[in-house]
Image (spheres, coloured by chain):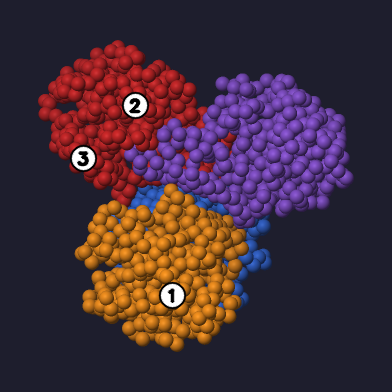
Chain colours: A blue, B orange, C purple, D red
Amino acid sequence: MSMQTGRRVGVAFVGMGGAVATTAIAGIEMIKSGSNRLDGLPLAGLPVAGMADYRDLVFGGWDLNGDDLASAASGHGVLTKQDIENGAQVLKGITPWPAVGSAKFCKNIDGQNRIVAKDHREAVSVIASDLRRFRQESNLDEVVVVNLASTERWPDLSDPTLNSTAAFEKGLDASDEAISPAMLYAYAAIKSGIPYANFTPSVAADVPALLELAKEMNVPVAGKDGKTGQTMMKTVLAPAFKARALHVDGWFSTNILGNRDGLALNDPNSLQSKLNTKGTVLDSILGYPVEDHLVHIHYYRPRGDDKEAWDNIDVTGFMGQRMQIKVNFLCKDSILAAPLVIEIARVLDLAKKRGEGGVQEQLSTFFKAPMVKNGHGPEHAFGKQEKMLRDWLGVN
Amino acid sequence: MSMQTGRRVGVAFVGMGGAVATTAIAGIEMIKSGSNRLDGLPLAGLPVAGMADYRDLVFGGWDLNGDDLASAASGHGVLTKQDIENGAQVLKGITPWPAVGSAKFCKNIDGQNRIVAKDHREAVSVIASDLRRFRQESNLDEVVVVNLASTERWPDLSDPTLNSTAAFEKGLDASDEAISPAMLYAYAAIKSGIPYANFTPSVAADVPALLELAKEMNVPVAGKDGKTGQTMMKTVLAPAFKARALHVDGWFSTNILGNRDGLALNDPNSLQSKLNTKGTVLDSILGYPVEDHLVHIHYYRPRGDDKEAWDNIDVTGFMGQRMQIKVNFLCKDSILAAPLVIEIARVLDLAKKRGEGGVQEQLSTFFKAPMVKNGHGPEHAFGKQEKMLRDWLGVN
Amino acid sequence: MSMQTGRRVGVAFVGMGGAVATTAIAGIEMIKSGSNRLDGLPLAGLPVAGMADYRDLVFGGWDLNGDDLASAASGHGVLTKQDIENGAQVLKGITPWPAVGSAKFCKNIDGQNRIVAKDHREAVSVIASDLRRFRQESNLDEVVVVNLASTERWPDLSDPTLNSTAAFEKGLDASDEAISPAMLYAYAAIKSGIPYANFTPSVAADVPALLELAKEMNVPVAGKDGKTGQTMMKTVLAPAFKARALHVDGWFSTNILGNRDGLALNDPNSLQSKLNTKGTVLDSILGYPVEDHLVHIHYYRPRGDDKEAWDNIDVTGFMGQRMQIKVNFLCKDSILAAPLVIEIARVLDLAKKRGEGGVQEQLSTFFKAPMVKNGHGPEHAFGKQEKMLRDWLGVN
Amino acid sequence: MSMQTGRRVGVAFVGMGGAVATTAIAGIEMIKSGSNRLDGLPLAGLPVAGMADYRDLVFGGWDLNGDDLASAASGHGVLTKQDIENGAQVLKGITPWPAVGSAKFCKNIDGQNRIVAKDHREAVSVIASDLRRFRQESNLDEVVVVNLASTERWPDLSDPTLNSTAAFEKGLDASDEAISPAMLYAYAAIKSGIPYANFTPSVAADVPALLELAKEMNVPVAGKDGKTGQTMMKTVLAPAFKARALHVDGWFSTNILGNRDGLALNDPNSLQSKLNTKGTVLDSILGYPVEDHLVHIHYYRPRGDDKEAWDNIDVTGFMGQRMQIKVNFLCKDSILAAPLVIEIARVLDLAKKRGEGGVQEQLSTFFKAPMVKNGHGPEHAFGKQEKMLRDWLGVN
């Protein structure tokens, strides 16, 4: 178990009423209440000096839905009635701050708890002031922002506005439509010296304009798109197929899920963002293009938050003979995601403390599309990513 | 592709008429005939100085079944009619040498092509003379022995005969029943300075008596039990569950296969040997005992050599919530095994050339129950095993 | 919905504290409390005159475990905490009557709530008096006995004691060991004019001695071995394979379950009883022996009552080409079984009312090994069984 | 086995060079050559008077690809090299007649072997003359047309041209675009008094105009869309779920296939035709709408003709508890389809001989969207369909 440091770290979620955020908060609450079951928390029990203890995390955040977290959680179907009751006091006591939203960037999700801001600049200013207030009122040593909002549509990355800090700031002045809500949060955080992680597939801290800013300000950033279920398995299995020289002829991946994320992905634009971040993993690990790599995600209500993935992999082995591997993963999206979010926040805080700004590549293992420091391609192989993280943490 | 070295290496199989050996031979024959499909050969294309080229391998070996390899292969159902026709000349031209067998150690497999030997000493002498003849007649630079015979029953390891070279040699003089056929082959090989690998679960080179001899003679040995299908997947997946702190509550593994191996495993004693080598992998990787780890192997004829594994894994994640992963592997036992056998032979030959005797731990990735040099436990995690091998080979 | 008849029917369970009985009782309780979700009850909503309404069922029974049903149920993990709370009053208020048990017939299950009887005759007399008392105290129009106790070992059917009523009654006098506990219950019920069903694989009402008695007394009997999960699917799929002339080369069935039934099946003798009733279904439907029909049941705790079946079926079609079907059933044993038990009780009661004694073949659809009236073999095909039942009920 | 009747029946396929047709022809050829393996032929061995023997079938047909059937077959990957060699003489000797095609109705499939016809009337005339020539040259007692061509896009069924024979014939005169190629074949066949079956999802004999004509001419017609894999399983399983009162909350069906059919379905219009015929099956059997019934078909090349279906079914049982069934069908599309096509042809011929024209409902079991005689809905439940067929055939 991590040592109690006394260091208080605030975690501000974009999308605080969502399934992942409420699960993360309830889970940590359970630990604060004395539970010593740390299942699912990848860094639990590692002796890392300076890392915040789970019990020292404090939560805040924005959401378009202004319900208190207990009622939000009861709609997601992730936490059991018992879980919610146990954490009731705390969850009921938390109401998300008004959020920035845009129907243009994310069609199927909407809400009434909106920042009243006449333009981009005012929105940024409200976000920054939310963060300041959070730090003061909760008496925090550090704050970290993690974006958990629904997937936005893919922006036009060739837009000059997104390609330098200077152009971006002009774009803010002009309320340029190329700038998405996620980017407003990222900008406000980085500009405030606060680490920022993209756990969604949305493009934000990884546009050149914001990368430049993060580097200049020496603020840790990380992303993007949490690697929880099917893609995680892909990055675990593909290196083994490569090591055994089993040629991957095709990889068919289908997913069914019935939560708010699934609904958001029913907007083809948001889906495309998701598929973009899923696509290249396989080719990158194997070193050749898998010609029949298909990935499908379907909104299927009977499962609620219990996502199910079915993968079929066709490989060719010795003497050209064909074999098949099928993987059926009955997982719980938010249960897999929430602890990763917590560990990302703890690592970003530690990076800030160590004075290491810019892209935090050591977090690659938690992302489908890891951000990298300079031109080189990201590492996708799960085992190598794990080694990177453990080396950075200084554990064997 | 490996560089052509001109170095001719003989591979002598115990169980040469079996599915794995005939597949290995036919596959290499295909390469000699000009095919450049090297799928399934893990070390293909790696730039390792001094390693024998696939085209420089020459095959020999023993089998209780004296049929030529073309007819043996046609009974196994691994090679297509086309494969056999393509390699017909060569396969028809190879007839296994008479073999040592014992109904006591392996009940369900028998044959007429037996070494006529009045006692252990004479059997050893025939084996050694087979190896000398093979080297001379085929004009070989080196010979390697790989045991592919059907699984023998687990011997009584506490028997003093197996615990020192001196006692073992006395046991040979007395035709001691504690000494199994596999041990006779291993002894004959090592005593002749010839590297020996146990690809079956049988206990042979890994009894203390023979380990001592291998070390003294500086002869490379490796084993045991080829890691091809289900166990390979287990050692790929378990490290990922550990990295994600997903607690494995149970792992149910069932296998159906219809080849000669399956028939041999219908003898409960042989099955036990197999399960012994499969059992500890999981606990060793995870660091805690998986209480409900069940492994079953069933002889099911419709599949022939096309082994199928179905695994169900129950894990507990964040907040005590349960998830399931199911893996269905439709594999071809011999197609997965044959290329590993070839790589093991090439690595053993290289070790001999480098003057490195005793247990070759760098081959761990190819074995379910890797032999180790000194007291420490074996490494089972697939990724770490791969790194060990690549480090030894001197590739990235 | 069935019409309210006012007719009160008592259902006395052998094994009342078990998962199936407590689930049946809680479920009916839910309906009595006003729920109109009748999912899983096959005969719900059919307009059958004279059939008892679900709300008119009253429950009693025996169990070696004397705990009240609320605590029994909480150990089975079938009912949610919520379910138990909702039915708490009723479940807490029911305590099973002391039961007859025999370590000789069922090894792994034991308990302290035993009938104190010096011999078979006294045990029968206690059972009969329990039934009389149940009828009187609960003011019932009819009583039905359903055996849900753990599977007993297979008796020696050639024993003359079991082959005529006269011999059986002499056996009772002599406390003959050929007579199992299940037979004592069946005898006591039939002799009291009370319908009896074997929902377990145990041999009871189906020994010739008791069949003779049931016929003579004109008492309805039915059995045996509830057809819930894997075998149900088998009898649904096999007729289709036959209709399409797909030849079944092999059918591999494996089951994992972690409830008390699973534990009882860890006794190889009990397991054999279970496999006996599962075995012939397939050959009977297809009209030829499936040579590789393997059925395995494994005790695997992580699932509790959530039984999982995995089937692999190999078929040969046109031009001798091979195909595979795999079925993975994540079911809940007691949730599937409980409503069948309820319907069996209602149908037996109706048969009694209609004056139809002896074997009730129309109940075949609910059993793995349906009892039949005279020499002819049982019907196993699911569709045909359904038709038999609906014809008997007089619904289209 | 059917009795040899001496009656020669010609089967003319639309799409003769396709995988299904070439498989059907090669399979019957195998039987003519003496094979007595009749696996996959549903009506083999039934004693039905007057039904043509498999050995008395003669094949002809049209295809846009003019290659001989041996080369066509070798491209499909259904028949083994051995199969093609065995039937080589016959297959090489058959070249499809030039066919009617329309890029408007089926985008992704094209070919050069086209009927040169200036308008609809001339196309019909060529088709009719092909059928006359086939009958004469092959000395046939009867001819049957079966449409196996790639799926066409769904026509506008409200178009008046398709709604009466008179309007349709005017449409022919005007080369009306509402009339698809499949309709031209159907019209030519029916007008020639030749039975016609739609084995594809294309709309043809089932437009009111052609139904009217078939009735008037007393010509048997049947269709549509062969029920082979996933939908067949659906109609087998759904009646069982209904019988057990398991409420189907969702049914997710995905298919991967890599043959010409799969490619054709990459055209969204053709896919829609396919999904239309697949969609209603479930609701019709269950008696309520399944809200989450998703069906997906994906073109995935590694499998070739080896179609794979994966279904996940969510059901609610007793006390509202949820269960899942997953079915993975590794099938061979053409191997399942070809024998159905043969049986349909034999039954249509028998209907003609019996003087029974119009829609042949007894063939429902072979179709995803069975045509019916009058307003009533089609029967989809597999067991009931089987009974209809066996009753019509006069076998028990």
| Residue B386: percent from left, percent from top | 40, 72
- Identify whether D379 is placed above or below A232: above
| Residue D174: percent from left, percent from top | 17, 20
- Judged from the image, the secondary structure of the residue bearing numbered disc 1 is helix
Neighbor class of circle 1 (other Cα within 10 Å; few <14, some 14-19, many 20+) is: many
**Quarter holding residue B200:** bottom left
Of all chains, the one bearing label 2 is: D
Where does label 2 land, which residue? D344
Of all chains, the one bearing label 3 is: D
> What residue is shown at x 22% (from left), y 78% (from top)?
B6
Of all chains, the one bearing label 1 is: B
- Identify whether C121 is placed above or below B339: above
- Judged from the image, the secondary structure of the residue bearing numbered disc 3 is helix
Horizontal side, residue C116 vs residue A150: left or right: right
Instruction: Say which of marks 3 and 2 sits in front.
Output: 3
**Amino acid type of the residue tagged 3 in the rendering:** Ala
**Amino acid type of the residue tagged 1 in the rendering:** Ala
Where does label 1 land, which residue? B123
Where does label 3 land, which residue? D88
| Residue D243: percent from left, percent from top | 56, 32
Which badge, 3 or 2, comes first in the chain's sequence? 3
**Quarter holding residue A249:** bottom left
**Amino acid type of the residue tagged 2 in the rendering:** Ile
| Residue B99: percent from left, percent from top | 41, 68
